[in-house]
Image (tube, rainbow, N blue to C red):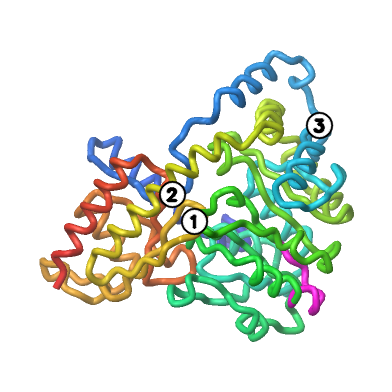
């Protein structure tokens, strides 16, 4: 009988939070399935289909007996080489195939990077607002997250001074993300260089998530910290994947690039966790990374148009402050001025979480509250959805919130 008093679920796994973005998206989809005209701004995925030539490569792979069997746990050799070539082409960073690990989407690359680098108590500097998966991966590895909080006044960019103020003798890793999810912030080449030099000076590891590298707008440009600061040497790990660039979120192919000892250790972990990534998906990824970037160029044009529309519409709502994002496909407006106000029927939202719930019920529009990203008082809206839905969704929210007093 004494065994019955023990918890059924381990403390380690009980401590994991559900992905807030996927939870909001699931609720919106359930309401839609029940016949309600819900518009969802929650999920971070392009609304475009995967390009035909990539799909054809997958179909062909299905017919190839070699791909019906196990392949190396760390990835198809030809895909690892292609990822190394693509990285040199797109960011100027030179890596060998042996420095590449193909993973089940970007999320597995994030998890494996921290699992491989961190011992219990090691600190990771994380710029907030941050993507919801980072804290869970750090925590599962026994690491301690130290937030460096930014806000709309700086366009959500962290300074070297802020990072230095957060550094302790336990700091092992700086997590660097540009373009950023959830804010769309993009660091200038000068800022990237300054932060990279600071990290190198203090012998920190840098884990850099470059999944949105091809989605920058206006005068903003992507700069890889690994290329900008060669003195980081073998203390940098690059995370990336095909999901956002080629509209392949469901295919689940990402990668980790790093020093050979880190990649070998992470590959050992993956060999026991999942073995190889689906060969069909790897064949599709091979077609993607060896092809040109015309697919992403077309998507970027649509995203840029939607970005400008959304920023303009949100800033017209009294009490909403929305900086213009320079990359990715999200806006991150502050709604702090709306909290505590009468929403027209005596109801008052004290938090952005409450406000998001009221907006979903009243307007049938799904937004993700800032609580999910470590900074309450904000919303994240993805503009990776059709133009008509985008305009209709923001209009509904504007109409509802403009009734506040």
Q: Does the magenta stretch include residue 201?
A: yes
Q: Does the magenta stretch include residue 363?
A: no
The segment highlighted magenta reads: 198-207
- Mark 3, residue position: 78
On screen, residue 245 above or below 111:
above
Answer whether labels 2 and 3 touch (C-beta < 8 Å).
Answer: no
On screen, residue 325 above or below 338:
above
Q: Where is residue 105 in the image (x, y as percent from the top left)?
A: 63, 43
Q: Position of residue 155 (x, y in %)?
A: 48, 71
Q: Residues within 10 Å of mark 1 (few under 14, many from 20)?
A: few
- Mark 2, residue position: 304
Q: Is residue 214 left or right of residue 202?
A: left
Quadrant hosting residue 98: top right
For mark 1, give the secondary structure: loop
Q: Position of residue 295 (x, y in %)?
A: 55, 34
Q: Is residue 59 left or right of residue 397?
A: right
Answer whether labels 2 and 1 touch (C-beta < 8 Å).
Answer: yes
């Amino acid at each position: 009988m004494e065994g019955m008093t023990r918890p059924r679920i381990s403390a380690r796994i009980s401590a994991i939070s559900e992905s807030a973005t996927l939870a909001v998206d699931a609720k919106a989809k359930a309401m839609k399935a029940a016949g309600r005209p819900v518009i969802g701004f929650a999920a971070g995925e392009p609304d475009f289909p995967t390009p035909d030539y990539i799909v054809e490569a997958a179909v062909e792979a299905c017919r190839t007996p070699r791909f019906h069997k196990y392949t190396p746990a760390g990835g198809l050799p030809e895909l690892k080489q292609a990822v190394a070539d693509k990285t040199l082409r797109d960011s100027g960073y030179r890596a060998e195939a042996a420095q590449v690990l193909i993973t089940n989407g970007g999320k597995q690359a994030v998890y494996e990077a921290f699992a491989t680098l961190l011992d219990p108590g090691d600190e990771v500097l994380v710029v907030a607002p941050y993507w919801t998966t980072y804290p869970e991966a750090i925590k599962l590895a026994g690491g301690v997250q130290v937030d460096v909080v930014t806000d709309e006044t700086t366009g959500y960019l962290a300074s070297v001074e802020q990072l230095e103020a957060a550094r302790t003798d336990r700091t092992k890793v700086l997590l660097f993300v540009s373009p950023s999810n959830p804010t769309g912030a993009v660091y200038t080449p000068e800022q990237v260089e300054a932060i990279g030099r600071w990290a190198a000076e203090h012998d920190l590891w840098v884990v850099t998530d470059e999944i949105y590298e091809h989605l920058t707008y206006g005068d903003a440009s992507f700069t890889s910290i690994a290329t900008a600061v060669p003195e980081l040497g073998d203390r940098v790990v690059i995370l990336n994947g095909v999901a956002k660039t080629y509209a392949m979120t469901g295919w689940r192919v990402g990668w980790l690039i790093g020093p050979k000892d880190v990649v070998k250790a992470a590959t050992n972990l993956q060999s026991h966790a999942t073995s190889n990534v689906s060969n069909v998906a790897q064949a599709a990824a091979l077609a993607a990374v060896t092809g040109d970037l015309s697919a992403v160029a077309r998507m970027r044009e649509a995203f840029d148009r939607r970005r400008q529309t959304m920023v303009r519409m949100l800033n017209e709502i009294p009490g909403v402050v929305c900086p213009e994002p320079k990359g990715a496909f999200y806006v991150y407006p502050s709604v702090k001025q709306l909290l505590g106000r009468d929403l027209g029927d005596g109801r008052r939202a004290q938090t952005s979480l409450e406000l998001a719930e009221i907006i979903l019920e009243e307007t049938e529009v799904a937004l993700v509250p800032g609580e999910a990203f470590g900074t309450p008082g904000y919303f994240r809206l993805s503009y990776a959805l059709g133009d008509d839905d985008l305009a209709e969704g923001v209009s509904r929210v504007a109409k509802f919130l403009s009734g506040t007093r």
